[in-house]
Amino acid sequence: MSPAIEVKQVCKRYGSLSALTNIDLEIHSGEFFALLGPNGAGKTTLISIIAGLSFANSGSVNVMGHNVITHYQQARLNLGIVPQELVFDPFFTVREILRIQSGYYGIKENARWIDEIIERLDLTDKADANMRALSGGMKRRVLVAQALVHKPPVIILDEPTAGVDVELRQTLWEFIQQLNRDGHTIVLTTHYLEEAETLCNRVAMLKDGKIIALDSTQNLIGKMTSGNSLRLRLLPDVLPLSLQVLQINRSNGLYELRIDDYAQVEFILSTLRSGQTQILEMHLQQPDLEDVFVNLMKNSRNKSK
Amino acid sequence: MTGFVTLLYKELLRFWKVGFQTILAPMISTLLYLLIFFHVLEAHVEVYPDVAYTIFLIPGLVMMAVIQNAFANSSSSIIQSKISGNIVFILLSPLSYRAIFFAYILAAIARGLLVGLGVYLVTVIFFDVPLQLPLLALLFGILGSGILGAMGLIAGIWADKFDQLAAFQNFIILPLTFLSGVFYSVHSLPAGWQVISHLNPFFYMIDGFRYGFFGVSDISPYVSLGIMAICLIVISTFTIRLLRSGYKLRH
């Protein structure tokens, strides 16, 4: 089976600025995939090329096996995009918009599915309101609904939770997770890394138009961080000799000790007890995607220096 | 086909929902032209024998309303969508470039004809306007608004800002319309200007349309019809190419 999205050797330049350089990426069917990176890394450019809103200078992109240039109609039928910008058509109501959007995709009778998306995205009260009358969060929901009218096998969400309240974020992700369980491939970009960490099974990190990391979320966290650690403030402020091998950092008066498994915590505590050392403060640190992100960005900055 | 029908429906609804501005307002301004010219010139000018100046003027003004509104419709629809960003929904959809083109053009034709028909119906209340060949007049109306609809599409795609669109309208569309013989017969012009007038494609629209009313025109209506058909085919092909290339719409 062909991958949901296949990006081969894609380059995109704007004048002398290279927005994307030799991007190779395969996103498999059924994946929940995150595209991460700082502002200006090229995430939206890449999405635009996949969506056919932008043309690559070289390379090719397929969506569900259909080339986005030569077989653009098939490719676009398979794709649902939630754009980052909060755009809307001020002439119509929510339901009219969704009906029109269905028509663009060749669907004449779509009332049942439209009703379902309206309900799932909590838009029922606003279904017959004009787009102009909606708040930013509501408009964002309509954008998501518009991307789903044709039940696309591949759904790309470009920062869908930017400026959105907690409640919508939760309903949105529940709905998207349900779609993923039903077999839809999901690609998202977000600046909330904990969202990507809990939702996505694979992550690509972009920086300056290049992919600097591409792996499963678990592998990335395992490889790119120093693992779990315990941070302690002690009285007296001296780390017993037998624990010094574990020390990986000392900052703000806290010792950071590496722990490879949780049994080590007991060893550390008993060592401190027998040395009459008092614990004033203690944190168990688990590495997350944010650490990976920060490390990667730091590394690539050092490299480019 | 559903995609095309939907986009056409959306485009029709778009101007229908703001009908005051898109249909009634241009009707009023056209009728004001008529009122003023009727008052000032009726007694002084005769273009065709046995045709009062006001009656001569009516088909020209109707056609002017038809083509100006056709242009306004497609150009303003595109530029509004571009500036507000919602054009992305059309660009993301699997609509073919041809379907996009025809939906915009047909909506432009519909608005042009609607305004023209409105003006015509008001004038027949007050004046006895002959309409000898209604189908031929309609055909000219369709071809003319089709050409201007396509020009509007090109202008809307090209312009990044409203003032660029206004420039296109004021420096190209308006002079071509006013100098096309709406208010006079080109036979009344000096020879040099007559030749220049024949280079203006709008001249054939007005002249042929007027033939539909009076059975009289400056040149054969079939020549005009042929020239307009060629214009429409050329400009349509160009516009579809433009849409396919993604010029100013896709980066």
Image: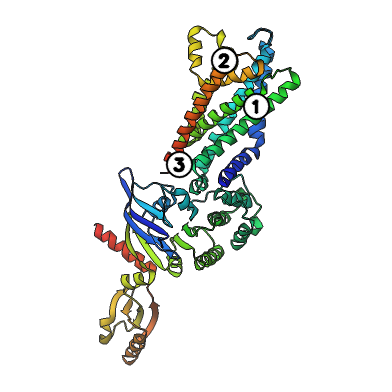
Q: Which residue is mark 2?
A: B220
Q: Which mark is residue B97?
A: none
User: Residue A269 location in percent, x, y?
Assistant: 35, 88
Tell me which amino acid carries mark 2. Answer: Ser
Q: Earlier in the sequence, mark 3 or mark 1?
A: 1
User: Residue B176 location in percent, x, y?
Assistant: 52, 21
Give residue A240's quadrant in the image: bottom left
Q: Is residue B216 left or right of residue A31?
A: right
| Mark 2 residue element | loop
**Badge 3 local density, few (<14 within 10 Å), some, or many (20+)?**
some
> Both on one chain, marks 3 and 1?
yes
Indicate the colouring scheme. Answer: rainbow
Residue in the foreground of this view, choosing between A44 and B58: B58
Tell me which amino acid carries mark 3. Answer: Leu
Residue in the foreground of this view, choosing between B35 and B141: B141
In the displayed structure, would residue B123 be above or below residue B191? below
Q: Which residue is mark 1?
A: B116
Tell me which amino acid carries mark 1. Answer: Gly
Q: Is residue A96 left or right of residue A227?
A: right
Q: Chain of mark 2?
A: B
> In whole angstroms, how far apart are the C-alphas of marks 2 and 3?
41 Å
Q: Earlier in the sequence, mark 2 or mark 1?
A: 1
| Mark 1 residue element | helix
Which residue is found at the position 53% from the left and 28% from the top?
B147
> In whole angstroms, how far apart are the C-alphas of marks 2 and 1?
23 Å
